[in-house]
Amino acid sequence: MILLACALEDELAFWEPRDGVELLVTGIGPVEAAAALAAALARKTYRLVVNAGIAGAFDGSARIGDGVIVAEETMELALESGATLMLPHGIELVDRASSDPGLVAQLNAKGFKALRGVTVSRVTATETTARRLAELGAQIETMEGFAVLRAAQRAGIRAIELRGISNRCGDRDASEWNFAAGVAGLQSIVRALFELPPVLAGMQ
């Protein structure tokens, strides 16, 4: 059984129900996503979690309407200055989570870009913030990616994050936000994923 998770049902308006796949609408933002996914994984065992939705891209990383794989997601858990938090007793701060590398490689071989994401709790709306996040290595931004991948990781379940690019990150008036284009890009990569033999096996 596969769990297909999105923040908003409209992001997966193209999805047609399939045997072996359950749809979960988590709500918007990292807290809603983590809580919804943790509850779902506590109730039932899944072979794979797929996080699918739209995202913004930083300049030069992807075009509006592209479908992309998020190979690694980060979340800013640091001082405002960007310095690392110093925690007592050697406690490790977990601020990264990854998609299943085998599935990433197979989709990448089909021509889909594998990018680095950053999960935010507010949409980037200035060029200053866009530059700062891009300098940290982010290529796209989401509001749920890290939460979903990390929840799956803690449950010991394979996961992958797929995104359709709906806008550029930066000044909101110049973002060229296009929800329909983002959904079209998402549709292309979701369909490609569900054509892969390992995923088809997980639906049985």
Image: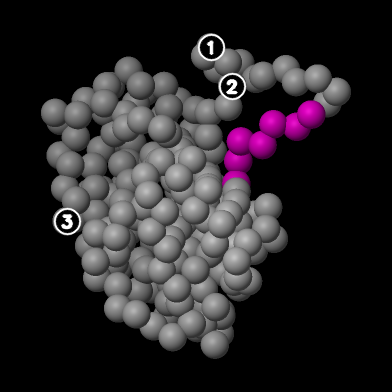
Q: For residue 153, what is the image quadrant?
A: bottom right
Q: Tell me the distance, in whole angstroms, between the alpha carbons under discs 3 and 1.
A: 36 Å
Seen in the image, is 84 located left or right of residue 197? Answer: right
Q: Is residue 182 magenta?
A: no
* Mark 3 / mark 1, whichever is N-terminal: 1
**Residue 167 against residue 186 in the figure, above or below:** above
> Which quarter of the rendered picture does the C terminus lie within?
bottom right
Q: Residue at x 30, y 73 (%)?
A: 15
Q: Is residue 93 magenta?
A: yes
The answer to the question of whether label 3 and label 1 lie on touching residues, with beta carbons closer than 8 A, is no
Does residue 109 show up?
Answer: no
Q: Which residue is mark 2?
A: 78
Span colored in magenta: 91-101
The image shows residue 46 at horizontal and vertical percentages of: 59, 71
Judging depth in this view, the residue of 98 and 39 nearest the camera is 39
Seen in the image, is 36 located left or right of residue 101? Answer: left
Residue type at mark 1: give it: Ser
Q: Which residue is mark 1?
A: 81
Residue type at mark 2: give it: Ala
Q: Which residue is mark 3?
A: 180
> Which quarter of the rendered picture does the N terminus lie within?
bottom right
Main SS, magenta region, reads loop
The local secondary structure at tag 1 comes to loop
The image shows residue 93 at horizontal and vertical percentages of: 69, 31
Q: Residues within 10 Å of mark 1 (few under 14, many from 20)?
A: few
- Report the residue that reaches farthest toward the top: 81
Seen in the image, is 89 located left or right of residue 192? Answer: right
Q: Residues within 10 Å of mark 2 (few under 14, many from 20)?
A: few
